[in-house]
Image (cartoon, rainbow, N blue to C red):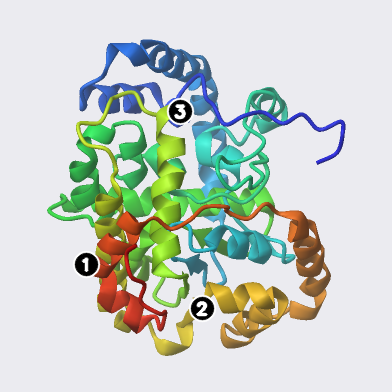
Amino acid sequence: MSNKEVRRRFSFLITVLAGGSVSHIIHLLASHSLDIKYAGRIAGTVIVSCILEPFRWWEELTWRRRIRRVSISKPPVFIIGFWRSGTTLLHNLLCHAPGTAYITTYQTVFPNHLGHSWWFKPIIGKFWPTHRPFDDVKMGMDLPQEEEIALANVQDISFYNFLCFPKDFDRFYNKELFMKDLDDKLIARWKSEYLKLIRKAILNKKGDRFISKSPSNMARISQILEMFPDARFIFLYRDPYKTVESFYRFFQEVMPVIQVQDANEELTRERSTRVYADMVRHYYLDKDKIPPQNLMEIKFEDFSQNAVEGLRRIFDQFDISGFEDSRQYFESYMDEMSGFRHDSYEVTSETIHWVNKYAGDIVTRMDYPARRAY
């Protein structure tokens, strides 16, 4: 970081739902209990949304035809590794290739306000955190971001709503992550809004191949294939013990600055492990639906040793042209990341215990050595 760069801590005066419509926010707030201690955060979210509402109407009217005319001409690439498996690194690298399109951090939080981003984005940027908590990854407004929060702002299904309403974790987990017992109309709306987000990203970045990163999509392979039968998938995986420990620690830092409701039960290490085991097993059950040539499984420890060569293999298998033209951008990004502060933590004995109990078979299947709790 240069001497002139100002580092802003990871904190929010409002929730990330502020980019949604007023009616959508009111519907969400009315569907969950709220705690009075978060009244300021709730009020700020509603006020910002009310201020932005006329601009949302304007964008809906002026962008509607432009969005419909966008052709998704190349198969999108979906990175579906579990949280804390190195997916951000892979996503950022792939998005450095010329001709790619992706949802930016700005579009993630304000998906309805791309048309006037030229004046609104600089204002928001002055208050936005410069780095993520825990791992120090940059959070610039124009950098690639996963689309789950954007989905939370445009329709009703998003697992990330649990960050605001952690008391209702089980409800989000079963219905909005795994899409169990959901009305067909809700799923159809989810698909429609997802397509719209992708088309707007293509317009925004002027690319022709969409690159997605969303761990939640591990549970939605069937729905994505219905939308994009020829989609490419990358399952990036990492040592399960480290993954679960990092997942637990990461959300312990994220949730307090977003929530508007206290949790009855913390996202404990046991619960974190069961989430991991459920999602990985769901992926293993659904992976056979993907044509073999459209799926890559990559071990993060191997990829991180030579990321550029790993990217070459992705380009080759998925028949993506332009690797040599992209190489300089990949190498430049890896040089930038050479000073990256890696996670400095120990995997606790408790995490090892729960991983052995709930995901011991996954440790074996992924070919990692089993650990003993100490």
Q: Amino acid at mark 1?
A: Lys
Query: Around disc 1, counting alpha carbons within 10 Å, would you say few (fewer than 14), some (14 to 19), or many (20 or more)?
Result: few
How far apart are the two marked residues, 1 and 3, measured between alpha carbons?
A: 32 Å
Q: Which residue is mark 1?
A: 357
User: Taking 83 as reference, is 128 left or right?
Assistant: right
Query: In the rendered image of this protein, does residue 225 appear above or below residue 89?
Result: below
Sequence-first disc among 2 and 1: 2
How far apart are the two marked residues, 2 and 3, measured between alpha carbons?
A: 33 Å
Q: Amino acid at mark 2?
A: Ile
| Disc assigned to residue 257 | 3
Residue 213, position as x, y percentages in the image? 50, 59
The quadrant in which residue 113 appears is top right
User: Taking 216 as reference, is 33 left or right?
Assistant: left
Residue drawn at the location 34% of the way across and 76% of the way down = 363
Query: In the rendered image of this protein, does residue 160 appear above or below residue 289?
Result: above
Q: Which residue is mark 2?
A: 298
The quadrant in which residue 319 appears is bottom right
Residue 116, position as x, y percentages in the image? 65, 29
How far apart are the two marked residues, 2 and 1, measured between alpha carbons?
A: 25 Å
Residue 118, position as x, y percentages in the image? 72, 31
Whether tag 2 and tag 3 are in contact, CB under 8 A, the answer is no
Q: Amino acid at mark 3?
A: Val
Residue 244, position as x, y percentages in the image? 38, 58
User: Taking 300 as reference, is 215 left or right?
Assistant: left
Query: Around disc 3, counting alpha carbons within 10 Å, would you say few (fewer than 14), some (14 to 19), or many (20 or more)?
Result: some
The quadrant in which the C terminus is found is bottom left
